[in-house]
Image: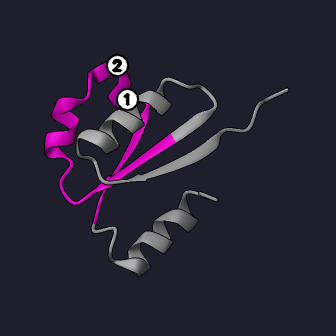
Amino acid sequence: MAQNKNSLLILGGGKIGSLIACLFAQCPEYTVHLVDLNLKQTRRMLSLAIADKIKFAEFDAQATATLIDYIKKHNID
């Protein structure tokens, strides 16, 4: 029987947000979404082995409509 994955949305790809994303990306029961205004630096910090397990999105999380659209599009509860 297939196991449903939990979606985790992390707002902010700085040191702490990236660390949390890396930790949860290693857990097969989670789909990790990492949102930041500028992910260029974040992608450099993450190892390639982990980065391919994270769904990156680059937008302003304070833009409420954009954030809500992203949450709905990706079925994040």
Query: Is 73 left or right of 10, judged from the image as shown?
Result: right
Picture quadrant where residue 65 is located? bottom left
Against 59, is 11 above or below? above
**Helix, strand or loop at disc 1?**
loop
Amino acid on which the number 2 mark rests in the picture: Ala
Q: Which residue is mark 2?
A: 49
- The segment highlighted magenta reads 32-59
Disc 2 to disc 1, C-alpha distance: 6 Å
Q: Mark 2: give few (<14), some (14-19) or many (20+) Cα within 10 Å.
A: few
Q: Please report the residue visible at 59 percent of the width from the left and 25 percent of the height from the top.
A: 28
In the rendering, at what x and y percent does residue 53 appear? 43, 30
Against 30, is 61 above or below? below
Quarter of the N terminus within the rendering: top right
Picture quadrant where residue 11 is located? bottom left
Confirm whether the magenta stretch covers residue 22.
no
Confirm whether the magenta stretch covers residue 34.
yes
**Residue 71's disc number:** none
Q: Are marks 2 and 1 in contact (CB under 8 Å)?
A: yes
In the rendering, at what x and y percent does residue 20 appear? 40, 37
In the rendering, at what x and y percent does residue 31 appear? 54, 39
Q: Which residue is mark 1?
A: 52
Q: Residue furthest top?
A: 49
Query: Is 9 left or right of 18, judged from the image as shown?
Result: right
In front: 14, or 71? Answer: 14
